[in-house]
């Protein structure tokens, strides 16, 4: 019986990991959609115009952490 439980748990863990990976991939795709952000200057936050950490720019982010949090709460891409 324990073997069945272990296999079930392992399958559930793989399913959850796949779902998380899928959601991360979708989020990265939305964040890197530079067609939508064609007017972005590549240096400042697209929404507020404030400074952006270099790390966020290198990751393809167009918003500062604050504006990204607001956008996520509003469901804005």
Image (spheres, grey):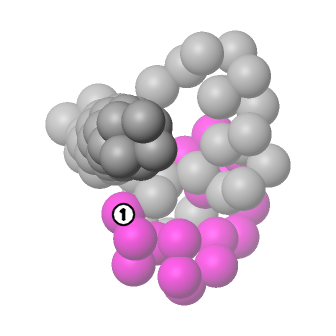
Q: Is residue 74 left or right of residue 26?
A: right
Measuring from the top left, give residue 26's x and y in whole percent.
30, 36
- In the rendered view, would you say 51 is above or below 3? below
> Dividing the image into 4 quarters, which one contains the N terminus?
top left
Residue extending farthest bottom: 54
Q: Residue at x 55, y 19 (%)?
A: 76
Measuring from the top left, give residue 7's x and y in whole percent.
32, 43
**Predominant SS along the magenta part:** loop
Q: Is residue 60 left or right of residue 5?
A: left
- Magenta span has 8? no
**In the rendered image, is residue 73 in sight?**
yes
Measuring from the top left, give residue 20's x and y in whole percent.
41, 41
Mark 1 — residue? 60
- In the rendered view, would you say 58 is above or below 25? below
In the rendered image, which quarter is residue 60 located in?
bottom left
The magenta segment: 45-60
Question: As rendered, which of 48 and 72 lies closer to the eye?
Answer: 72
Crowd band around label 1 with a 10 angstrom C-alpha radius: few (<14), some (14–19), many (20+): some
């Amino acid at each position: 019986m324990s073997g069945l439980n272990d296999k079930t748990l392992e399958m559930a863990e793989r399913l959850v990991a796949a779902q998380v990976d899928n959601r991360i991939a979708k989020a990265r795709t939305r964040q890197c959609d530079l067609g939508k952000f064609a007017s972005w200057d590549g240096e400042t936050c697209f929404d507020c115009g404030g400074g952006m950490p270099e790390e966020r720019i290198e990751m393809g982010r167009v918003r500062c952490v604050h504006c990204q949090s607001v956008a996520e709460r509003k469901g804005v891409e």
